[in-house]
Amino acid sequence: MRRFLVMVVAMTMLAACGQGGGTSTREPTDGDAATSTTEAAETDGPETMAEFFGYGSEDPEEQQAQWRDEEARRQELIRACMAEDGFDYTPVQQPEDSFQVFGPEDEEESVRTQGFGITTWYGNEDQFSGPEVEWVDPNQEMVEAMSESEQEAYYAALYGSEEEQMEGATTEIDPETGEEYTMVEGYGAGCEGEASEEIWGDQSQTQGLWEELEPDMTAMYERVEADPRTVELNDEWSACIADAGYEYESRNDMWESVYEDFQQRFDEIVGPDGGYADPFEGWTEEEIEAFFEEKTQDEIDAFFEEAQEGARADIDEEALAALQQEEIDLAVANFECSSDYDEQYQEIAAEYEAEFIAANRETLEKIREAQGG
C-alpha cells in the first residue's frame, strides 16, 4: 500500500508540470539524502521533476497538440520501417476526437456526475466513453486484398511475430486469487514497437534506474508529507471533510482506502465480473467461429445484449444506486475541500524535488536520455 501511495504522489507531482517553485526555508535534517535547498537553488537545472523531463503544459489544447505531434512522428517511423521490410504503409491519422484532455471545469463536472469513477461507470457506460467516431484504417483495403500468407507477413512486420511479441514476458501470480497471468513490458514488437520506443524511450533501460532511485524517492515524498505546511494542509482538509460527515486524517488516508472499499462493495452487489457474463461459456472454438460466420451483425448485437441483460437481472438496483450516490457525495466533498490543496502542495513538493534532482542528477539524466528527452 505504501508503494502504491508513493506512486500516486509521484504522479501528482509529475502532472503538476512545474507549478509552484521558490526557495525552501526549512533546515536540512540529519540523514537527508538530498543536497541543501540553497545548493539546489544554485543549480542550472530545472526545479521540478516535470520540468526536468519536459512534461507538457496543463493546457488541454497544448497537450492535444503535443500528442498529435508525437503520434505523427511515430506514424512516419512506422511507414519507414515497413518500407524497409518491403511493405507499403500509409501513416494513420487519428480522428480529431480520438484524444481527449480535460481542464479544471471538466474535472468539476465529472466529479459531480461520476464521482471517482469506481462504481459509477456501471449503467452509465456512455458517459465514460468518448464520442463515437467513424474511422477506417487507410491500410485496411490494401491488407484485405492480400492473400492469407501476405497478411501474416504484413502483420508480423507491423506487430512482430508471436515469438517476438512474447520476448521478455514473465509469469506473475495474482496475490488475491492465486491465478497466473502473463506480463509483457515495453511497447511490443515489430515496426509499431520500434517506432513507439523511438518516440517514448526504452522502458527496459529506465526500469532499473527508477528502482535504484526508489528508496531516496520514497524518503523524499515522506518528507513532503511530514513538512509542517503539508501537515497543516491535511489538517484543514480533514476538518473540512469532517464537516461533510467523513473522517479521514489526510487525503492520502482517504486514497488508501476509498478504492478498495468501494470496489469490494460494488463486487458484492454486481458480482466479481462487474455484472458481465461470457455468453460463449461452454462453447467450443468451432461453435464460436460458426456463430459469427452465420449470424448478421444485428443478430450478434442482440445476442450480446440479451446475455448481459440476463447477467444483470438479479442485481439489487437500489443498493447499487445508493452506493454510486455515496461515491459521488464523497468525491464532491473531497473536491470542494481541495480547492487550494493541490496548488499549495505542489509548491511545497517543488522544493523537495529540486533537492532530489540535484542529488540524483546523473541517474535522472540517464533516464531522460533513455526516454528520448
Image: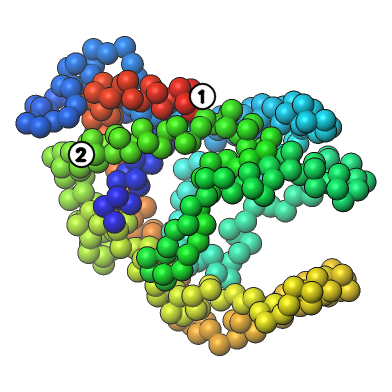
Percent position of residue 207, x then y:
41, 37
**Left or right, residue 279 beside residue 238:** right
Q: Please state the horizontal and vertical placement of residue 300, each as a whole percent of the image.
A: 80, 73
Question: Is 309 rendered above or below residue 116?
Answer: below
Find residue 31 and report its image quarter: top left
Q: Which residue is mark 1?
A: 372
- Residue shown at the point (69%, 52%) measured from the top left: 131
Q: Residues within 10 Å of mark 1 (few under 14, many from 20)?
A: some
Distance from the alpha carbon under mark 1 to that under mark 2: 27 Å
Please state which of residues 252 and 342 is positioned toward the viewer in this rendering: 252
Pick the residue in front: 321 or 15.
15
Name above or below for residue 66 compared with residue 174.
above
Question: Which mark, residue 219?
Answer: 2
- Residue 115 visible? The answer is no
Q: Is 270 on the left or on the right of 237, as rendered?
A: right
Q: Amino acid at mark 2?
A: Ala
